[in-house]
Image (spheres, rainbow, N blue to C red):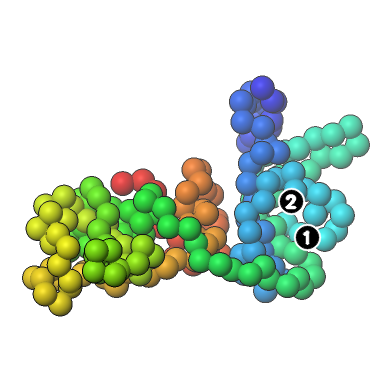
Amino acid sequence: MQVVEVDGMMKMTSNPVLSERTLLLDVGYRPLSIVSVRRALLLLISEKAETVHESDHVVRSELLEVVAPSIARLRYQVAAPYRRRAPLHRKAVFARDAYLCQYCGRRAECLDHVYPRSKGGEHEWENVVACCRSCNAAKGDTLPEHSKFRLRTVPYAPEPIAVAAALRRGVPPEWDTYIVNRFRLSA
């Protein structure tokens, strides 16, 4: 348990503030990564970063009192890490497709490979969509050009930071300004 100040009142919390998350931006306000509040505070104290948006938590020590940042920006240019493709997660595909069948628009219950794996289709973002059971069973392993099913939207690979934010619970709404194509996990 930890005591934190929220809106001027002291409250007990079971979630330590230092394990919360902070969105880290580069000099040009582009998202670099999601770091712990502890890491963000170390960057702020060493004057390597500045706070863009504060959370409602205060971290206190014997000599220092700092408002925990929700968004921090580095003060100097860094080489952006190599952005490999976001890992393909079932939850993230449902979130990307807004929990709707990409063939009929009803509530999605399963995943479908647009180009079936049995016909050489890959298990990648551009080939996997959310769909309902009836459409999945009816489509079977037919190719798109030989079936009556047409996609409502073209599947795409989201940014890795968008998937990381989507898979995290309790993402602050102020992050939406900086994370492009952010999608929600709630159905």
Using residue 167 as the reference point, say whether residue 78 is left or right of it. Answer: right
Labelled disc at residue 49: 1
Few, some or many residues within 10 Å of mark 1 (<14, 14–19, 20+): many
Using residue 121 as the reference point, say whether residue 78 is left or right of it. Answer: right
Give how far across and how far down residue 69 sits, in percent. 69, 50
Q: Is residue 104 visible?
A: no
Which residue is at a point 9% across and 58% down the rendered structure image? 138
Labelled disc at residue 150: none
Which residue is at a point 48% across and 58% down the rendered structure image? 87
Q: Nearer the viewer, residue 148 or 116?
A: 116
Q: Residue furthest right?
A: 63
Q: Secondary structure at mark 1?
A: strand
Between the residue at mark 1 and the residue at mark 2, the CA separation in whole angstroms equals: 8 Å
Q: Nearer the viewer, residue 34 or 138?
A: 138
Query: Looking at the rendering, which quadrant does residue 73 occupy?
Result: bottom right
Which residue is at a point 11% across and 75% down the rendered structure image? 146
Marks 1/2 in contact by CB < 8 Å: the verdict is: yes
- Amino acid of disc 1: Ala
Give how far across and how far down residue 40 sits, in percent. 74, 51
Q: Nearer the viewer, residue 122 or 91?
A: 122
Give how far across and how far down residue 24 sits, in percent. 67, 59
Q: Which residue is mark 2?
A: 40
